[in-house]
Amino acid sequence: MKKFLIVGLGNIGEKYAETRHNIGFKILDHFAEKEGFSFETQKLGDIATYKLKGRTFVFLKPSTFMNLSGKAILYWMTKEKIPMENLLVITDDLNLPFGSIRLKMKGSDGGHNGLKDTQDKLNTTKYNRFRFGISDAFGKGRQIDYVLGEWTDEEKKTLPERLDTSVELIKSFVLAGVNTTMNAFNGK
């Protein structure tokens, strides 16, 4: 049975739950709600497993806070014996319009501290990442307030549909592979 580690980046704690920076957690929580499974707190994060068509999804919401995400990712990849090509890291992206999604097989951290720590701990920039656009609708010097801010009412209206699409992207990544998924979902 093939195993995949699906990591949603975010910060733990109620005060971060509905922030833009926590879209990785939000997507995994949405997946769990739709498919009827729950997370359990374990070492360095909340873990859940889900099986579909002979594949095992190991979901991870790191409890290390965003800037130390790589530690939890490396631990669970090693513990579950998951190869690099079966890793998917979900993160927010300021450089994409709100709700747009982009799957890539490698790339820079783009200034994102969670990705920066991940590539430091994995010692590579060649890992799959799913970027969810949160836009850059903030004033000069307001980036931290923006990413740690909550969704606007307008964003909240379209978020459920974008979360559904995100769940379908994750399933496609595991079942159909990264190239097919990029062709089907990038730019949607």
Image (spheres, rainbow, N blue to C red):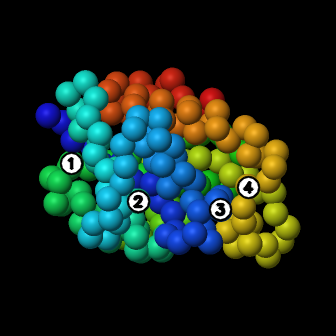
Q: Amino acid at mark 1?
A: Pro
* Tag 4: amino acid: Trp
Residue tagged 4: 151
Mark in the foreground, 4 or 1: 4
Q: Which mark is residue 83?
A: 1
Residue at figure coordinates x 53%, y 37% from the top left? 166
* Mark 3 and mark 2: Cα distance apart in space: 15 Å
Measure the alpha-carbon separation of dots 4 and 1: 35 Å
From the image, tell me which residue sits under label 3: 19
Q: The residue under label 2 is which amino acid type?
A: Lys
Spatial distance from mark 4 to mark 2, Cα to Cα? 20 Å
* Left or right of 123 on screen, residue 11: right
Other-residue count near label 1 (Cα within 10 Å), few / some / many at <14 / 14–19 / ≥20: few
Q: Label 3 vs label 4: CA separation?
A: 6 Å
Give the answer, above or below, for where 160 lies relative to 77.
above
Q: Position of residue 123 (x, y in %)?
A: 30, 65
Point 45% across, 54% down: residue: 8
Q: For mark 3, give the secondary structure.
A: loop
Q: Is residue 126 visible?
A: no
Q: Earlier in the sequence, mark 3 or mark 4?
A: 3
Of label 4 and label 1, which has the lower sequence position?
Answer: 1
* Label 2 sits on residue: 61
**Which of pointers 3 and 1 indicates the residue nearer the eye?**
3
Q: Which of marks 2 and 1 precedes in the sequence?
A: 2
Q: Earlier in the sequence, mark 4 or mark 2?
A: 2
